[in-house]
Image (cartoon, rainbow, N blue to C red):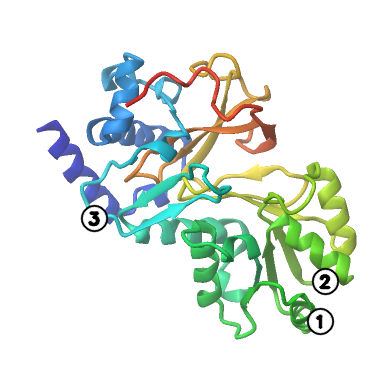
Amino acid sequence: MVTLFYFIYFCQMMDTNAIFNIQTETEFENLAIQIFKFQFENNRVYRSFCDLLYIHPSDVKSLKDIPFLPIQFFKSHSVLSSKESVQTTFTSSGTTGSNTSKHLVTNLEIYEESFKKGFEHFYGAIEDYVVLALLPSYLERSGSSLIYMVDAFIKQSNHIESGFYLNNLSELKDRLTTVDSQGKKVLLIGVSFALLDLVEAHQFQLKNTIIMETGGMKGRRKELVRDELHAILKQGFGVDAIHSEYGMTELLSQAYSQGKGIFNCPNWMRIVTRDTEDALTLQPTGKAGGINVIDLANINSCSFIATQDLGRVYQNNSFEIIGRFDTSDIRGCNLMVL
């Protein structure tokens, strides 16, 4: 009966768009606790994890009481809180033979609303931009949530110049130089190694373009620290700042950095950090630790995820990524085999 109640409640809640209308910290916390209760009742994997920690909804009075599901369970289990049919499955990239994360999505409209409103919150209407995408490693496989998002941005753009680019860097150079010189607002979003390829082949002095890197060399190049990567890209594109997008297969929301690697979340997403040796203990603001993500748009999977990233959260809820865990498993989180 409780399960049915929460299922009906959240179906009604989604009609009111409560997630994307959050305005205050109190609203965020209250809704996060309600979503925890819903997912505890409806998500078999998350429920089992909570049971092993002896955590029940009656124990959860605030955000700090909510347990975070280790992200590796998206590789080994179907993480679902919805009874609806799966509309699509987003998958992570991976080497041959390796396990990849699978995010089962039962409502693509939630994802579409999340990425559209999230981008608008920081940059304004996507319709106003020429969207140029340099994402070869993602285009070369299927199931990328990033490609789904950027494809929607391109379709929503009011400019016919928008589009994807693979290996045609000279064509991209001509298009980018032309639209920037015409005074149009331009978003060039690309994976790090491809942006480096572009500035090594061509130099720019851009005035109206946002350069946004999505991170990762994807095995194509030697990894660079953020400051070194951004310094090369700033010089190559002739811009003052390099923007970044923080997202992942397991999430339906993105955080954005408008420079210096400091990210901000939309109102329905938060980052907290955990102790690297004790995964159940949250770190105080400003202290480095493992990144835990609260993504309320993940209503139909799991909204509380312990990632393999290391970072630091600041007083205004901004955060930075400072590295990754050395091992493939998140220490302190290997509590169960379902």
Three-letter code, disc 2 = Lys
**Along the viewing direction, whichever of 238 and 170 lies nearer the viewer:** 170
Please determine whether, in this image, residue 206 is positioned above or below residue 285.
below
Q: In which quarter of the image is the C terminus?
A: top left
Q: Residue furthest left?
A: 1
Side of 208 relative to 94 (left or right): right
On the image, numbered disc 2 is attached to which residue?
Answer: 207
On the image, numbered disc 3 is attached to which residue?
Answer: 85
Q: Quadrant of the N terminus?
A: top left
Residue 26 appears at what percent x and percent y? 43, 33
Disc sitting over residue 181 in the figure:
1
**Of the residues under marks 1 and 2, which one precedes in the sequence?**
1
Mark 3, mark 1: which one is toward the viewer? 3
**Of the residues under marks 2 and 3, which one precedes in the sequence?**
3
Secondary structure at numbered mark 3: loop
Look at the image and tell me whether residue 152 can be seen. Answer: yes
Residue 81 appears at what percent x and percent y? 28, 41
Side of 322 relative to 154 (left or right): right
- Mark 3, Cα crowd under 10 Å, few <14 / some 14-19 / many 20+, is few
| Tally of numbered discs | 3
Please determine whether, in this image, residue 332 is positioned above or below residue 226.
above
Q: How far apart are marks 2 and 3 (CA)?
A: 46 Å
Q: Where, by quadrant of the figure, is residue 107 drawn?
A: bottom left
**Along the viewing direction, whichever of 188 and 166 lies nearer the viewer:** 166
What residue do we see at 74% from left, 77% from top? 172
Q: Do the residues labelled 1 and 2 touch (CB within 8 Å)?
A: yes
Three-letter code, disc 3 = Ser
What residue do we see at 76% from left, 62% from top? 195
Secondary structure at numbered mark 2: loop
